Amino acid sequence: MPSAVTLIRSATLSDVAEYAYAATAPSNARLVFLAGACPLDDDGTTAAIGDYVGQAAACVDTMTRALADAGATLEDVISTRVLVASSDRADLGAVWEVVRDAFGAHDVPSTLLGVTVLGYEHQLVEIEAVAALVD
């Protein structure tokens, strides 16, 4: 089934950004708001302690599984917010590469933020997402 999401790329804005600048969904779309995907193993422990890339991959896996539970896929995501507990741009960039690669050509509008701390012990990454589905 084709995605309800239409990505909008701007010819008047910089092409340096590795994502679409905006996205739309039709008025009959059902929105799915995901809780922040955290890097937690099935037993509730934090995965990949100390590893930004490993935690980003674990967050993508968590997000993908939550989307599937809602009947959605990554191609149905209309926006993301990626939180990284670091003030080092290299850490943010490494996490972004994992997220960008997971989405591939479906380069949804995204915000990448460095934050001081996240909720779980040893947590370095969290990904928030909104998806749009047409039933």
Image (spheres, rainbow, N blue to C red):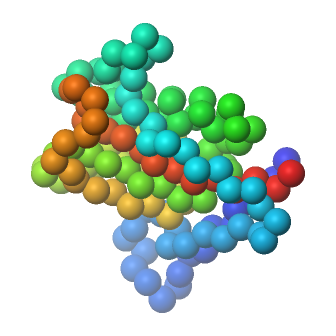
Considering depth in this image, is 85 or 97 the residue closer to the camera? 85
Q: Quadrant of residue 45?
A: top left
| Rendered view: 55 above or below 102 | above
Residue at the limit of the structure toward the left, as seen here: 87
Q: Is residue 56 left or right of residue 7?
A: left
Residue at the limit of the structure toward the top, as seen here: 43
State the image coordinates of residue 98 (x, y, percent, origin top left).
40, 40
| Rendered view: 43 above or below 127 | above
Q: Quadrant of residue 120?
A: top left
Q: Is residue 38 left or right of residue 104?
A: left
Considering depth in this image, is 127 or 104 the residue closer to the camera? 127
**Number of marks drawn:** 0
| Rendered view: 60 above or below 14 | above
Considering depth in this image, is 109 or 103 the residue closer to the camera? 109
| x 40%, y 68%: residue | 17
State the image coordinates of residue 27 (x, y, percent, origin top left).
78, 71
| x 53%, y 81%: residue | 10
Quick check: can you spot residue 118?
yes
State the image coordinates of residue 84 (x, y, percent, origin top left).
26, 45
Q: Is residue 24 left or right of residue 130?
A: right
Quick check: can you spot residue 94?
no
| x 37%, y 70%: residue | 16
